[in-house]
Amino acid sequence: MSKLCIIGLDGATFTVIDYLVEQKRLPNFSRLMDEGSHGTLLSTAPPLTWPAWASFFTGTNPGKTGAADLFKFRPGTYKLEPMNAGNLHGTPFWSLAGSQGKRVCVYNVPVTYPAVPVNGILISGLDAPGFNDKSIYPLELREKLLEAVPEFRISFENDAKYLVNNHKEPVKEWIRQLKDYLKMEIKVINYLMQLEDWDLFVSVIRSTDIFQHTLWADIEKVIAGEEVSGMEMMRAEAVFACYESIDRELGESWSRWGSDRNLIIMSDHGFGCLRGIVSINRVLAGAGLLKFRPVSSKKRSRSYLVKKLQERLPLETRQRIKRFLGRGGAEERWFSYVDVLVADIDWERTKICSIGGFGCLYVNLKGRDPLGTVSSEEERQEVLAAAETAISELRDPRDGQPMVTRFYRKEDIYHGPLMPEIPDLIVDLRDWAYCTVIGTASDLAAESIIREPTREWKQLAHTGAHRREGILVLHGPDVDHAKLKGAQMVDIAPTALNIIGISASRDYDGQVLEAALSGGRAKQVRETDITDDAVREEHKPAGDTYSDSDEEEIRNRLSDLGYL
């Protein structure tokens, strides 16, 4: 019976891989691509970690998962809650595999907290607030893992703001810390691999994404053959070394463990330059489609001072203060981003607003939203058209060219029962080269609508942003040699199940990638009588996923990683 290993490389891109293959620095990537099948893997729109990984493991689009951004509105409220397994819809393909007796191991995949029971092991990813009892199944593995990997952490604790203000060589120190995190990720994967001869092994390495967000400008210069400084070369080489470390494991530990099984290497999205940050809500306000509540100068200055003080404190000190303050009571909560995200919107006078990092726009609908102002589908379409007109006028001040590549209305690209919960409009700004201001308090600041990336991070500011073009490489006894075209995130779940001998759910939006599979493999799988709904109900997280302190931890992490 065929077995499968999936290695997800968050943000991995052929832009880097092809360059390093040409330089003969990735011999194992080169071999796998030459012998197997490979091609671009198209991410979701927008190409963000949360919706992309959700579509990867459910095989369905955001209209069915409910995940289109980092956050979603809690139904019937203006409360934003982080995406996680508790508010996600759809069944992970490893749960379907486990229901058919397959032994599975899942590590570090985002949007998998809390960890639900599987026929094997599941260790949650980025959305877990910490390595607590709800982030691993079975719980008895926790102490064994910590004994084998004492340095284990759920996420890279990015202390960039503190480093740039307090360290003599912040870039080198940040690179050193991230290299240690990459080593830890690889060590955990190798530990889990040797525990059992898994039928399905799924893991994600996030270091590729983190490296590229900060160091992309240096990579781009080197790949383009431009003249670079010693510092720029050092920064670029840190990213190249990350890919080389992964390539080395492909040729040693992972290939040896999986010599008789199939291998999929894929990413949730690709990467490119970050040209700037855009305040979409300021544009909407200028068009009369959004109204802000006034924020007193006293409150704004107090928030500014708190923010600056946080940046001067090391991560461990901030965490100790947070634990000391507890869950509530104080008017100014040091580590809460709830108000920053939505509190400054005057909902009673707002028709549409932007929430999230990639221009996701929500219409304020009567009958769905508590203070909705848009009463009919006809008016909704009028509001969307007015928003498109206003945003289309954006020009990059550096070249004078239009910034909008295209608009995606949700009904044109999504479908499913959760359509009311996802953004009405997504704006692609210059092929995703711009991110948007997250929150509204900063939209009120006396700054230009188009601004430079996060200035307070200085040398460690983001210079790279996501693109839809990710990577896909397949190799193994059931894989043909082919150049793949048109593969999408939703295709991985049905293809993975097919490889291990299970038919895909009829609810899947993706298709089995038959061109990559040998001997008509996709036509040999028998139907099973298990239903997607039955498996989902059996493995559905119970109760509230996050406590208040858990949610603060997630928001702080997203801020430290540059997403907030």
Image (cartoon, rainbow, N blue to C red):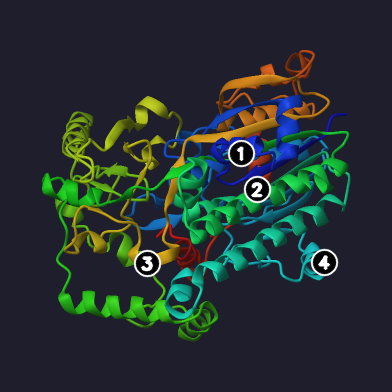
Cα–Cα span, label 2 and label 4:
24 Å
- Amino acid of disc 4: Ala
Q: Sequence order check: which comes first, mark 1 or mark 3?
A: 1
- Where in the figure is residue 477, as x and y percent of width and height? 83, 26
Q: Nearer the viewer, mark 2 or mark 4?
A: 2
In front of the other: label 4 or label 3? 4
* Residue 243: assigned label: 2
Q: Earlier in the sequence, mark 1 or mark 4?
A: 1
Which of these two is toward me, 117 or 147? Answer: 147
Local SS, label 1: helix
Q: Is residue 96 visible?
A: no
Say which label, 3 or 2, has the lower sequence index. 2
* Quarter occupied by the C terminus: bottom left
Task: Judge from the rendering whether residue 22 lies leftward or rightward of residue 270; answer left or right.
Answer: right
Spatial CA span between label 1 and label 3: 37 Å
Q: Is residue 460 above or below residue 405?
A: below
- Mark 3 closeness class: few <14, some 14–19, many ≥20 residues within 10 Å: some
